[in-house]
Amino acid sequence: MKRISKRITTVLLAALMLSPVFAAPVSSADKATLDNAVTGAAAYMLNTVKNPQVDSVGGEWAVLGLARSGYAVPDSWYEGYYNTVEKYVKDLDGVLHDKKYTEYSRVILGLTAAGYSPLNVAGYDLTLALGDFERTIWQGINGPIFALIALDSGNYVIPRNSDAKTQATRDLYIKEILRRQIKDGGWNLTAGADGEIRTGERSDPDLTGMALQALSKYQDKPDVKEATDKALVFLSERQDEKGGYFGWNSTNSESAVQVLVALCELGIAEDDPRFVKNGYTLTDNILSYREPDGSFKHTAEGSGNSQMSTEQAFYGIVAAQRARDGENSLYRMSDAVKRGAAVARASDADGDGLPGRHADVKPVPLTAAGKTFDDIGSHASSNAINALAARDIISGKSETVFDPDASITRAEFAAITVRGLGIAPVAQGGGSDPFDDVNPGAWYYYYVNTADHYGIAGGVGDRLFNPGGAITRQEAAVMVARAAKLCGMDTDTDAVTIRDTLAQFDDYRTVADWAQGALTFCYAEGILDDSVLEIAPKETVTRAEITDMLYNMLMSADLIKV
C-alpha cells in the first residue's frame, strides 16, 4: 500500500521524439587532435592565469578547466586560488554580492573543481546564499541555472536559510527554469522575467545550452524531459552548416561551447546525427577557433584571442574529452581530487549538538564530500541521502546504487543510527551478547549490540533481534525518537498533544499504543512529513524514508547543519 499524498501529481504528455538530421559522414576531431588541443589550452591557461582570482575572467572558469582536464598543475596553484578566495570572502564578511547570486555559484564551482569545500570558507558556508530562492532568481534565468549546476556539482544539500522569504529547493529552481522556456523550445536572458512569455520571443543557443546543463540531472521528471526534448529540437534546427551557432550578433565559439557541454551533461554523443552538419560536429566547430598558441578566438573573423572565449572553449573541449573517455562529466565532480578544506571538520560544517546530549553522541565529520549514487537522481530524498553518504553514515547496495525505494532491515537501521550519532560501536550490550540470532561474525554484530546497549533498538523477544526483518513506520518512529533523546531532544508528549497531532490522519486509530508518543514527537519535529493523509503505521518503510527521518532528526539535534 502506498501512502496518499495531498499533492496532486499531474501526468504530463510523453516526451517528444526527435527526428535525426542526416548529414555527410562524420569526420570529427580524432583522439590525438582533441587531446593535443586540451593539452595546448591547459598549458596556455596555466601560463596566462598565474594567480587565479575570484572573477569571471582569470578566475573560476580557468580553475574549472584545468582541474577537470587532468593536466599536471602544481598543488601550489590551487592552494593560491583557495587562499585568494578565503581572503576575498573574509574581507566581504561572507557577502559576495547583495544581488548577483551567480557570484556564489561560480565560486562554489571553482572550489569544488579544485577539491576544496565551499561549506566552510573563512567560517562562511557559501551554499547558504543559494537557500534564498527570491534573491537567487532576482538576477534572472542565470540565477537558478547556476544555482542548480553549483549545488549538483558536489551534491550539496541546500541549507535552511533563516533569512529567506522563500526557502529554496531544487524543485523550485527547476520549476523556475521550466517556467521561462520560450515557445520555440529554448531560453533567452529576459523571457519570463516579468512572469510572461511574449509571442515572438527568440531563444539564444548559449542560454539554452546552460539551461539544459542545469536540467541534465533531472531527466527522470516528465516535465523536464519534455522541456529538454523541445530544446534539443531547437538547438538541432539552429545549428549552422559548420556545426556552430549564431548568437549575440555573431557566430561565436562560446555558443557552441555551451551546447556541447549540455550534450555531454545529458550523455548525448557529439556525433549524434541531430548535431552533425555537413560532417562537422560541435567539437570540430570549436576547434576551428583555436590559435597556434593554444588559445581560442571569440569569432572566426577576430584577431588574436579573447581570454573569456579561451576559458570557455577550454572547458568545452575538456567536457568532450571526458565524455569520450567515459569519465564523470564536467560538472559532476564527485571524482575531484580532494584538497585541504574539502574534508571539513564537524565543528566547522556542522553543529556541536544540543547541551543535553549523551556524552558519547558526537557530530560526524564530512569524509566523502560529493558522494552520491547513480539511482537517486532527483529523488525526493536525494538531499538527505547525499548528506549522510558524505559522512559515511549510510552506504549503498554498491558504490553506484543506493536502491532508495527498497525496504530496510533492522540490522541496517541499527548501523546507520549508531553511525549517525557518532557513537563508537561496542562489542556487547550490557555485559553479554543479548541476542542469539546476532552472530559475532556478522557485519552488523557491533552495531546491533550498540543500539541495544544505548536503548535505541531492542529485540523482538526470546533473545532474538531479527536482524533481517523489515521495519514498519511506527517501529522506525520509536527508534528515531529514542535516538533523538540521546541527542538531547525533549521527546516527552502528553495525551492531549498526542490526540491533537494524530487525529488529523485518517488512520490514526491503527497506531499501536506504544508508538503514539514517538509518532507525535516525529511529526512535531518535522522528522516525519505531516502533509500526508495517512500514517500507515504498519507499512514497511523504505531506505529513503529512514534516511530522511535520521537526517531530519540530526538537523533538529544540531548535529548537521548542511
Image (spheres, rainbow, N blue to C red):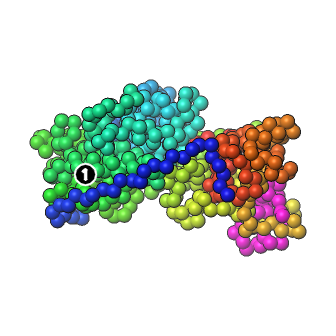
Left or right for 454, reference 527: right
Residue pictured at 57% horizontal, 61% vertical: 402
Q: Please tell me how crowded label 1 is: few (under 14), some (14-19), or many (20+) other residues with Cα within 10 Å.
A: many
Is 259 magenta? The answer is: no
The quadrant of the rendering that contains the N terminus is bottom right
Q: Does the rendering let one see residue 185?
A: yes
Up-down: is 204 above or below 225? Answer: above
Residue pictured at 60% horizontal, 59% vertical: 405
The x, y position of residue 222, in whole percent, is 45, 51
State the SS at label 1. helix
Up-down: is 265 above or below 99? Answer: below
Up-down: is 345 above or below 91? Answer: below
The x, y position of residue 199, in whole percent, is 29, 33
Which residue position is annotated with label 1?
236
Residue pictured at 49% horizontal, 54% vertical: 377
The x, y position of residue 499, in whole percent, is 82, 39
Left or right for 106, reference 341: left
Quadrant of residue 99 within the rendered picture: top left
Tell me the amino acid under the disc marked 1.
Ser
The x, y position of residue 548, in whole percent, is 64, 49
Residue pictured at 88% horizontal, 68% vertical: 462
Is 458 magenta? The answer is: yes
The quadrant of the rendering that contains the C terminus is top right
Helix, strand or loop: magenta stretch: loop
Left or right for 308, reference 413: left
Left or right for 511, reference 527: right
Q: Nearer the viewer, residue 561 or 413?
A: 413
Q: Nearer the viewer, residue 477 or 334?
A: 477
Total labels: the figure holds 1
Specify start and end residues of the magenta stretch as a single range: 432-460
Q: Does the rendering let one see residue 476?
A: no
